[in-house]
Image (cartoon, rainbow, N blue to C red):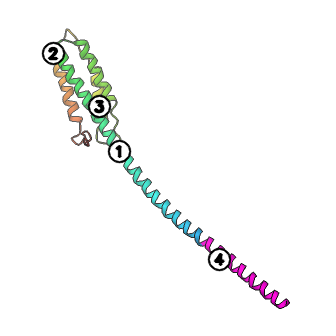
Amino acid sequence: MSEAVETNKSSVFSKVKQALIGIIVATMVGAGIFALGWWQGNSKANSEQNLGDRQVELLENQLEKARNYGYLMQARAELYHTAVDLDRRNFGTANTRLQEAAIALGKVKDASGNIDTGKVSSLQKDISQMNINVAVNLEEQRQKVLGLVNKLNRLIPEDLEPLPVQK
């Protein structure tokens, strides 16, 4: 009888041992599958992050181009308005518009190298130093303002245009 009890105990022990080994193997396989999935998901997230970073950089460059274009166009408009104000004998308004044009040019910041910021700064200095006087020949002052417009036009790169409007 003791042999039968020992045989039952060893068969039960053998079955428990096999069950525990099975649980351990299943846990290890599950952990391996989890690690593989995590690694693949992480690498996909990293590649999507890199793609997102590149898109953000591209959009920031486009935004800078659009801002620079806006500042240059604002300066151009202020200079043309200065010439019109001279024709209308609005000397104070003309001087104010000159300063507004200089301020707009001071906002131009170009990290991409499309605009010669040294020449823009020089033009800004020329504009800010100009003062329209009542007693001086108006045609000469008007020609000087239009000369500043021509300098500005030469500084605007042809590829610098506003972003296309999406519908």
Q: Which amino acid does label 1 sit on?
A: Leu
From the image, tell me which residue sits under label 2. 87
- Give the amino acid at mark 4: Gly
Measured Cα–Cα span from mark 3 to mark 2: 25 Å
Residue 98, given in percent of the width and then of the height, sits at: 26, 21
Q: Gap between marks 2 and 4, in whole Å?
A: 96 Å
- Please, what is the three-letter code of the amino acid marked with disc 2? Asp
Residue type for callout 3: Tyr
Decide: few, some or many residues near mark 1? Use Cα within 10 Å; few <14, some 14-19, many ≥20.
Answer: few
N-term mark: 3 or 2? 3
Which of the two marks, 1 or 4, is nearer to us in this view? 4
Q: What is the x, y in percent for residue 120?
A: 29, 32
Which residue is labeled 1 in the image?
A: 59
Which of marks 4 and 2 precedes in the sequence?
4
Q: In which quarter of the image is residue 76?
A: top left
What residue is disc 3 on?
71
Residue that label 4 marks? 22
Q: In this view, does 132 lie above or below 3?
A: above
Is 160 displayed left or right of 2 in the figure?
A: left
Q: Of the residues under marks 4 and 3, which one precedes in the sequence? A: 4
- Residue placed furthest toward the right: 2
Q: Where is residue 46 in the image (x, y as percent from the top left)?
A: 46, 57
Note whether residue 155 is visible: yes
Q: Earlier in the sequence, mark 1 or mark 4?
A: 4
Would you say the residues marked 1 and 3 are in contact, meaning their CB atoms lie under 8 Å apart? no
Measure how far apart labels 1 and 4 are at the Cα level: 55 Å
For the view shown, which residue lies furthest in the front direction?
1
Dot 4: element: helix
Q: Is disc 2 in contact with disc 1, using a CB cutoff of under 8 Å?
A: no
